[in-house]
Image: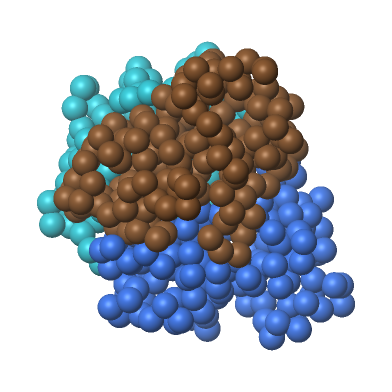
Chain colours: A blue, B cyan, C brown
Amino acid sequence: MNSVQQRLADAGVILPAAPRPVAAYVPFVRVGDLVFVSGQIPLCDGGLTATGPVPSKVTVEAATAAARQCVINAVAVLSDALDGALDRVRRSVRLGVFVFSDAGFEGQPTVANGASELLQEVFGEAGRHARAAVGSVGLPLGATVEVELVAQVS
Amino acid sequence: MNSVQQRLADAGVILPAAPRPVAAYVPFVRVGDLVFVSGQIPLCDGGLTATGPVPSKVTVEAATAAARQCVINAVAVLSDALDGALDRVRRSVRLGVFVFSDAGFEGQPTVANGASELLQEVFGEAGRHARAAVGSVGLPLGATVEVELVAQVS
Amino acid sequence: MNSVQQRLADAGVILPAAPRPVAAYVPFVRVGDLVFVSGQIPLCDGGLTATGPVPSKVTVEAATAAARQCVINAVAVLSDALDGALDRVRRSVRLGVFVFSDAGFEGQPTVANGASELLQEVFGEAGRHARAAVGSVGLPLGATVEVELVAQVS
């Protein structure tokens, strides 16, 4: 088990099969040493862990957990892109986090931390990333969070 | 006619002149082998093909057609970036699709497919891309869709 | 004083200390010759210069000024990334501008120009960039604008 796999296990994360896109695109594109991972929603065991806006339908806590699930799915895609060799992730570069928000909700950073902290837990220094966290009036399939990722790999 | 131009013709697409930015920025920036195309709205013959939110003002079908128009405009910009040599597009890397949505609308993937499918129709394998599709509470000039593109070129 | 510093002074801009992220991420990531700057909100002297949606709570004019503040903060981060040598900015590549908007507000391009024009004022030709401007239903800490930046550096 390589060190990233060890840290995934330590974090209690079992990587799912990489989610299949819900439409006409691909899970990732590699260009040079960058991998662009498509927007991930909190799919888990065939369903979404959270749907609806924060905070009227979903608590900040549940949304934060959903953000974590989104980025776990992104890591699963990245694993596919690297034929399982997640130790070849040199850096998570940029995380885009969209949070399905009631008008005026301003806690997107807290929600997005669910994704950010998982990356740092799993990849250590290489998991530190630039980020934009933004509210959205509606997301695919009613998902509470959508996360996209750019990573540098070797 | 190169093969991309042939496929554009087969798809019934006549590339417009690349739309001029509606404000203080440029249509694209090339850095290395990547071209970043600015957000495109569904301008056509001097007007927008769709304005207002989905679904209260614009149907999913009309929004999907608008997304197609947005990406046609993005391809027109890319053509400018390559002095017309669209065969030098090696890969469409990432598509960002923002859909002007009523609160809770969740059909962004369907709408975004209007853009994704045109890229694949025109560029074939090279048209397969990573994507994020997101709802927005309001877009420039009231446009129903905005699409931005990163492409790899040679 | 190098030429970028001179133009900052001419524009009346005193670069602040680079804002610290409001959560679990880093201000920037450099990968090759690209620097990805995290989403910046209009922090100034420890507070936000504008909070709430446009136009019901914040005028277009005030939002435009807030967008300028956001990008000043992004330039401060870029300066940190380059140990102060802003003359090593070869190009501002892509600007992402999210505007906290009332439903249907469509003046995002005007607001985003507050950021775009500052970049061109300070960096000249190198400040010309691709851009996406989008409405958002809510942004971190209630900020009126959030701006993220990708720049090419040497």
Q: Is residue A153 left or right of residue A60?
A: right
Q: Residue C55 or B99: which is nearer the viewer? A: C55
Residue at figure coordinates x 60%, y 45% from the top left: C18
In the picture, residue B10 is in which quadrant?
top left
Residue at figure coordinates x 63%, y 70% from the top left: A117
Classify the position of the N terminus of chain C by image quarter.
top right
**Residue C143, x across and y down, in percent:** 37, 53
On the question of residue B92 being in view, the answer is: no
- Of all residues shown, which one is farthest toward the front? C45
Q: Is residue B5 left or right of residue C60?
A: right
Q: Is residue C52 depicted above or below C121 in this figure?
A: below
Classify the position of the C terminus of chain C by image quarter.
top right
Q: Is residue C38 depicted above or below C89 in this figure?
A: below
Q: Residue A116 or C73: which is nearer the viewer? A: C73
**Residue A114, x across and y down, in percent:** 55, 73
Q: Is residue C84 depicted above or below C105 in this figure?
A: above
Residue at figure coordinates x 23%, y 46% from the top left: C58
**Residue C110, x across and y down, in percent:** 29, 31
Q: Is residue C88 left or right of residue C143?
A: right
On the question of residue A16 being in view, the answer is: yes
**Residue B37, x across and y down, in percent:** 48, 31
Count every numbered label the image shows and give the total: 0
Residue at figure coordinates x 34%, y 20% from the top left: B20
In the picture, residue A15 is in which quadrant?
bottom right
Q: Is residue B89 depicted above or below A100 in this figure?
A: above
